[in-house]
Image (cartoon, helix red, strand yellow):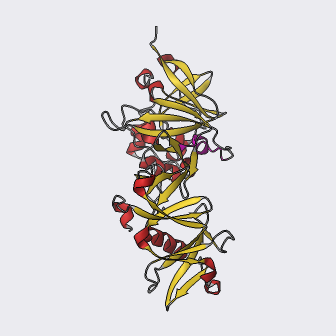
Amino acid sequence: MADVSHAGLLKPAADLQIAVPEYQMAEYVVDPDLAPVPLAPQHCRSVLFWQDKIVPLMELAQLAGNDSAGPVESVVVMAYQNQPGAPLRYVGIAVAEPPARIPVDDEQVCDPAEDYADCLRAVTLSCFSHDGQPTTILNLERLGSVDFRKLAVAGHPRLPAFPRDTVRIHLPAWAEQSNTPGLHRTAACEEARAYFHPRPLLRWF
Amino acid sequence: MSALMNEPVQASDYALLGFSGIQLAIPQREVVSIDLVTDIDTDLAANKRVGSLVKAGRQWSVYALSESFDVLHQIPGQRRFCVSFGSGDDDHSFALVCDQVEAVVLDSVGIVQPLPESIVMPVMPMRHCFRNGNGLVLVSDRLGMQDYLLALDKDNG
């Protein structure tokens, strides 16, 4: 019998669901106290006042191409560390529904949807099927990084530099097109291809 | 490159400029004068500037910023004050119009912290922030704002 663990299921939009480790969820906040930040990236254009902290708010629906997302009505505050022993960092994820607790086991591993946004693939640790829908596991450390901010702002897919033993990804479409001007299939792309086999899910939860 | 970009914020006394819901803090020591918008010569509007402030042979290019930090080509009606920075002897001196100006002492309002790195963009003139009452205060300095406004001017060609 496969091992079962539990994950937090977040829905940044009606058609987008992601999973996070339960232990990283700090609080679900309804009617959050937000402040816009001028000149900030579209997907991270506000901060959340939470407890005594000023926390960046991520609108993942924007990264999924959903520009028509309405005002943020609820947020899940996540806590994470960039490395063991490092200070806790916080990020808010805008959600359309309250988070849920769901069981996950390694039998559920699957690939992300074919049309899953490249930017979101860049913050994906792994993927599993839940209620028949591919559900990606969010890499919070990557999401809060300068590298990811640059990637998201650039607005074009780029091969993310993941640690090879922790992440499985798909090549972005451009990497499959060797005739794309200025972009060629590189050794790094070929290495990335080697990641395309299921990884255990339970390591994340 | 502004000192703000490299060093922790060390000032404790700030001028808090309010406009279009934005609160922008700039060290008080960098404020040269506060005038009324009626003192602005709008006939000298050019490029991204809404006019110039001319005093005693010195001149400051005046800008009006929106809540998204875009330049406005006219001074909104609720802007009452013009806050000047720089000596007025060079092309880099500038002034910002705002709805209100007040003095804040950081010890009394909270802790200045860096803006989250997932938010900071190279173009931003602010790198720090703090909470003041119910709002977010963005912290910049004269050089940071000067670089930003010059970049906007150049962007116009």
Q: Is residue B5 visible?
A: yes
Q: Residue furthest left?
A: A85
Q: Residue at x 60, y 83 (%)?
A: B39
Query: Whole-percent x and y of residue A105?
Result: 49, 17
Relative to B44, does residue A94 appear above or below in the rendering?
Answer: above
Residue A125: quadrant of the picture? top left
Q: Measuring 57% from the left and 34% from the top, which residue is drawn there?
A: A29
Q: Extreme bottom residue here?
A: B57
Nearest the eye: A1 or A191: A1
For residue A95, above or below residue A155: above
Residue lying farthest front? B108
Q: Is residue B146 above or below residue A198?
A: below
Quadrant the N terminus of chain B occupies: bottom left
In the image, taking residue B154 as reference, residue A141 lies left or right, namely left
Decide whether residue B70 is among the magenta residues: no
Magenta range: A57-67
Picture coordinates of residue A43, whole percent (x, y): 56, 47
Task: Count numbered badges in the picture.
Answer: 0
Taking the image as shown, residue B38 lies to the left or right of residue B126, namely: right
Q: Position of residue A162 (x, y in %)?
A: 39, 39
Most foreground residue, B116 or A151: B116
Whether residue B156 is visible, yes or no, is no
Please give the name of the residue rendered at 44% of the width and 71% of the height, measured from the top-left corner: B142
Residue A66 in magenta?
yes
User: Which of the two residues, A110 or B68, is positioned nearer the viewer here?
Assistant: B68
**In the image, residue A2 above or below residue A198:** above
Picture quarter with the C terminus of chain B: bottom right
Q: Position of residue A88 (x, y in %)?
A: 38, 37
